[in-house]
Amino acid sequence: MALSQCNYNLLNWPKIKSGLHQVSYDRLLVSAEYSWPWDRLLTALKFNQRTLNAKALAEQFYRVALVNGAKVPEVILPMPLHFRRYTERKYNQAIEIAKHLSCLSGIALDTQLCRRIKATQAQSRLSGAKRRTNLQDAFSLCHQPCYDHVAIFDDIVTTGSTVNSLCKVLKKARPSLHIEVWAIAISLSPGSN
C-alpha cells in the first residue's frame, strides 16, 4: 500500500473506499495493512499491556503517513473507550499511541472532547451490519467543538463503523468540521459492509 499513489488519502483508492460503509469523513490515513509485524504490536498493546509498543507504532505512522507536507489538523482526538473497558485495561491504546504522535508531530491532543457513553460488544466479533447497530448512540461530546480541522485517531480500521459513529456526532455539532481518520492499520474483509 503506497499512500503517495492515492495522494495521501486512502479514500481515493477504490478498493479501500468500497470496503468502507457510508464514509462520514474527508480523509483516511493509515500506515500499514493489518499484518505482521503491525498486527502483533497492536494486539500486544491492546490486550497484553505492552504500552512500550505505542511509541514504535506512533513512529511508524509519523514516518509513513505524515511526511507529505499536507495541512495538518489542529488536534488529534483519540478514539474514546467506555469507562468499563478502560477499567479492565487500565489505559486506552489509542491515547497511548496518540500521545507519542502528538509529541512527534507537534499537533495538540484532546482527550476531553469526546466520550463513549454506551458499553458495546467487542466490534471484532461482529459483522459489518451488526457493528453499525452496536454503535448507535455510543458517543457524545463533552462540549461544543471549537475546531475546524481534526484527526480522529484509532488503532485499526476494519469497516469504519466506529469512526463513522463518532464522526456523525462531531458533524451534528459542527457541520463544517473537516475530519480526517488516522489509524495504524487497516483490515478490510470481504463482505464487511
Image (tube, grey):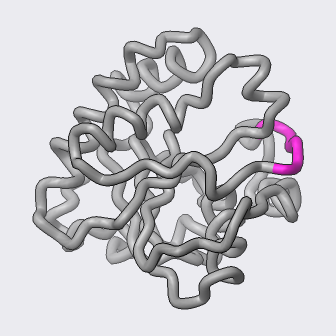
Above or below 3: residue 6: below
Above or below 61: residue 41: above
Q: Is residue 134 left or right of residue 102?
A: right
Q: Quadrant of residue 26?
A: bottom left
Q: Which residues are magenta?
A: 117-122
Q: Quadrant of residue 136?
A: bottom right
Q: Is residue 81 magenta?
A: no
* Most foreground residue, 178 or 40: 178
What secondary structure do most residues of the magenta stretch adopt? loop
Q: Quadrant of residue 15?
A: bottom left
Above or below 156: residue 133: below
* Most foreground residue, 63 or 106: 106
| Residue occupying the point 66% across, 45% down | 80
* Most foreground residue, 25 or 147: 147
Visible residue check, residue 101: yes
Give x and y (percent) for residue 61: 28, 42
Give x and y (percent) for residue 105: 22, 47
Give x and y (percent) for residue 64: 19, 46
